[in-house]
Amino acid sequence: MIRLLLLAMAAAASGSFAQTGDSPKDYCRDTLEDIVNKAGANPASGERLIEQALDFTNAQPCMAQLFADYIKTARVRAIQKSLQGRLNNQQLTSTTAPQGTTSPISKPATSALSLISEYGGVTTSTQNQTATIQISPYKVPSNLAASGWVPYCDQWLAVTRECISGGLLQQMNRLSASITANTNTSAQSLAAVPVSGSTSTGSAQPVTATASGSRAPSFAGATGKYVLWYNKGKAGKLDFSKVDYSTATGRLNQLVRDLAGNRLYAQWQSCLAADLSAIWVDPSAPHKTLRSPAEIGEAIKNALEDYVKIADILRLGEPLKSCHAAITLPPAGDLKAARASDQQFIADLPAAIAALDQIQAQIDAAIIQTMTTPALSVEYDFSAPVNQPTYSIAKLAYSYTHQGAEPASKTACPASPTGAGKPAGTVACPSWTLTLNAGLSWYSATPASSIPGSSLLRDLQVGIEWDQPIASSQWKAIGSLIGDTTLSATYYYQDQTSPSILKVTPGSPVAGITLTGLPATATQVFTQKGNIHCAQLRYAFGTGTNVKFPVAVTWSNRSELIARPTWGAQFGVSYDFSSLLGSPGGANK
Amino acid sequence: MAESELPPAGAVIAPCKISQAAGEINTFRVKAADLPVSVTIESDPASCQFKIAQIDIYSGEAKVDSRPGINDVTAKLPPTAGKKLSAGTYAVYVAPTPASGAPVGDPFHGGTALVFESCDAKTLLLIADASFLLPHFNLEVV
């Protein structure tokens, strides 16, 4: 049941499974031509490859090709799970659209799965508490493939039509989304009237309360983000130490065991050895030389015809009927025993191919995650603030992370807003990060013409943030208590091209705002528009951990409603659950 | 030996301990007393910078030795220090790391990883490439 649920999640996250078309490549021919190509440069390599090719389990792409139909219908998956993993350069505050954010700046990347609770709202006139869940759809299918729960399209073993491809995962790695709810402002309102017939005149009065609306948290906003551009990592600095090949070697070794002593297989090996020896002028010479290209071509053609006969031998359990090389084949021996061996090989083959896919998924996940750092993203926010018209924001977010010196030790990088926890010795530790934002927002509907100066365009906005990690874990006395931290300085500018609008219902209060003297016909109120300059200092505890506590102090020359300078404080907590989704390589631990 | 063929000063040239087992396919032979031996990986082209990622050794169905995360161009066979291999035949898998700069889906990036015994004649034990993704050889310990 759990597996079905995870498969459904992967399918939903990916949108659809990738389809690999029928490959025009002939991997068996490639295998034999590989021998000739390498023998041309170094005869010893050619001899070694012939030996390897005669052990059929070594030529995995050819093996997968010959048994593709069977593997497609009998795919068996090892079910394993890991509990480790981190993504880097992630945003761990909600975006600016929801009204309770502690930060006016968006980062290009998002955590795979995180939950954020914040109290704030840097440009709003009233503080709000919000809860945000962020998710990147990449991690779930990537880990399902790396742990063998869903098929992965290894391009060399792409015999399965329905599988998740590396290209699809790369695209999914660019996507993230979040949804935010108001948690301090109930969507439900109450009306109370004196109890019917009450004659009490005291200071305490009985009332009858009636509710309208829902008690569920109200929707505050949603965000979708797509990474346009990555900073490429340094070639050769990838960390594949977590990729464990044991599952694949164990499965392949089982195939070797299945064929041990199989006389039909031995016949085929003898035939192939003789066929392939035809590429040499003198096969028995200690220093071999290749024949002419035409003769080699003929030898490879013959060898290929005999090479692919292994499929029928193993499927049907019948002796080799012919061999191009004029040799006497060894006796077939006990056919019943050979057929039992063949059947066991066929039964074990899908798991071996699946294990190789799994290794490739782990390698590709390491490449996707480690080699790239999101640098430029485009973001769409939809915001539904309480008692205000809904609006949208389109935004570009750019981050530059300055790479520090490569650490000499093998310990993890010191504190960093983006690279904490990265194993040292594989990458340079990031030292500081600069993030730039530019965007515009617009109302979902054109404001009423009775609001002077209003337009569909709500505002233009730019922002800049500088994050400096602090190795506070090394401070005496409190270092071990607070761990590493990050100091951030932010400047944000918003040009209000349209006045801020509040929706009011006469007789019903607006949360946090007292309106007096309005005519009974008023349904909207608005204030004077202007330019907002906002500066913030933020200190975040928990750098390099899965739980972060940003605390911020903000000054602005005005807020969206109040045209006077104002101070505010914001704080929050974010939980990064990415590690619960597992990581490549941990699957086999 | 001509002077130009002399090994560089300080170079350690060890006699080869592993030899091809005549008449047996994909099989090498070594004396138990000669173990462990040093193996090294080379890249063609050199820019691929393959390293030995992992060595697994099986005897029948049993995995008798395994060392993941080697991430070096040289390793010992068997890879675990102090591990003894008694007389018998073993299947030896040497997994290379992906090539330097390999894109998603193409771990060999057109290159070839060659695993040798580190000795004067550089016995070629294994070749891994796009046609032989995770090959093995048989090691007969006598």
Image (cartoon, coloured by chain):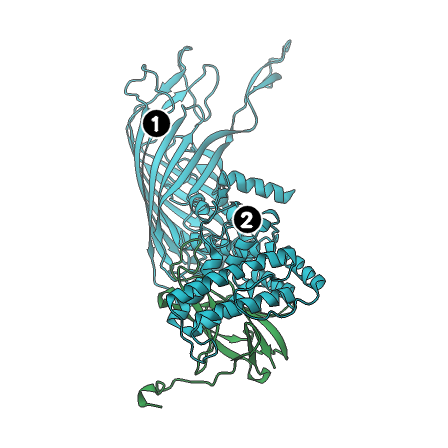
Residue A29 versus residue A320: which sits nearer the camera? A320
Could you classify mark 1 by the number of other residues whose Cα lies within 10 Å: few (under 14), some (14-19), or many (20 or more)? many
Q: Is residue A446 visible?
A: yes
Residue B34 versus residue A190: which sits nearer the camera? B34
Q: Position of residue A245 (x, y in %)?
A: 54, 62
The residue at the far top in this view is A197
The chain in green: B
Q: Chain of mark 2?
A: A
Tell me how far mark 2 sits from mark 1, CA to CA: 43 Å
Q: Position of residue A101 (x, y in %)?
A: 42, 37
Q: Chain of mark 1?
A: A
**Which residue is under mark 2?**
A151
Amino acid type, callout 2? Pro
Considering only order in the chain, which callout, 1 or 2, is on the residue closer to the N terminus?
2
The chain in cyan: A
Name the element at disc 1: strand
* B31 left or right, relative to A471: right
Where on the picture, by quarter, is residue A405? bottom left
Above or below — where is A504 with respect to A147? above
Q: Residue at x 54, y 42 (%)?
A: A10
Q: Position of residue A263 (x, y in %)?
A: 65, 67
**Which residue is under mark 1?**
A442
Count of all numbered marks drawn on residues in the image? 2
